[in-house]
Structure formats: C-alpha cells, structure tokens
Amino acid sequence: MNTESDGARVRLRTWRLRFTPTPRHAVEARRGARRVLRSWGVPDEARETVELVVSELATNAVRHGRVPGRYFEVAMAYDGEKTVDVEVSDACARLPVPADPDPESTSGRGLLLVAALSESWGVRDRGVGKTVWARILF
C-alpha cells in the first residue's frame, strides 16, 4: 500500500501473522518480527526496541490473554522512515493494566517497558478480545 506524505510517496510496509498462544510461539513472534524488520532495513537500535515491544506484548497475550482454541496475532507497519506500529491481538476481553511490581519480582513489568520504549500505546476493543498497540519512533 502506498500513501502520500508531504507530497512524497511513502511505501507503508506491513506484516501480520497468527500464533498459537504458547510460550514457544511468543518467542517465534519475536523472531518473525526480527526477520521482517531486517528485511525492511530498520536500523539495528530501532529494531531491537521493536523486537522487545513485540516480545512483551506477545508474552502478555500468552500469559494473560489466552483463550483455549484461539490464536493471538502480531501485526507491524513501517512507514519506511522513522515509525513502526506494533499490534498484538488476542481473544480475551480483559484489559491490561500496568502493574506496580515488587522490586524483587521477576515479572510484571511488560507494559511499563512498552510505555517507556514507545511514543504512545493503548488498547482497542476488537469485538472478540482486544488489540494492544504501540508506536515506536526512531
């Protein structure tokens, strides 16, 4: 898909894939994102940030959004310049809430990381489930 931006043509690159909600597939979602981001030519530092956001949101979909017999989906869009949008959708309607984890805890910081690494993030209703999205600028 091509869009107009300030009189110049910008090629929007997109990627979308569904996964079974298992820990192994959360890892596969990150690996898939890594391959796609490399093929798009996203700079290393930005790619690492996007990979971490994908990993955190996919892990949340597996841990907190899992619905038996349903998939989670990861989607990314790159404007070819300085913005990558990430979306992770699952079938669970329960909304994510950033935690205030105990300093000794080894988990519970995923959404805090997403908020720190992204320009903005949020949650959209999907009718069945939700989509958690983040916009990464570099």
Image (tube, rainbow, N blue to C red):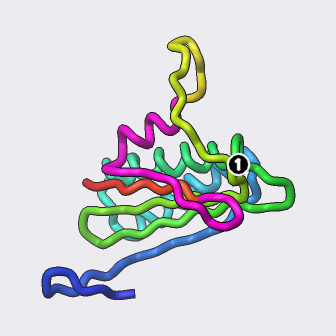
| Residue lying at the far right of the rendered structure | 69
Please give the residue where the numbered disc 1 appears in the rendered image: 65
| Residue lying at the far top of the rendered structure | 104
Q: Quadrant of residue 89?
A: bottom right
Amino acid type, residue under disc 1 in the picture: Gly
Q: Which residues are magenta?
A: 109-130
Image-based side of 12 in relation to 54, left or right: left
Q: How many marks?
A: 1
Residue located at (76% from left, 58% from top): 20
* Residue 116 falls inside the magenta stretch: yes
Residue located at (16% from left, 85% from top): 8
> Considering depth in this image, is 69 or 13 the residue closer to the camera?
69
Question: Is the residue 61 above or below the residue 112 in the image?
Answer: below
Q: Residue 114's x, y, as percent?
A: 44, 42
Residue located at (67% from left, 47% from top): 94
Q: Quadrant of residue 116?
A: top left
Quadrant where the image shows the N terminus:
bottom left
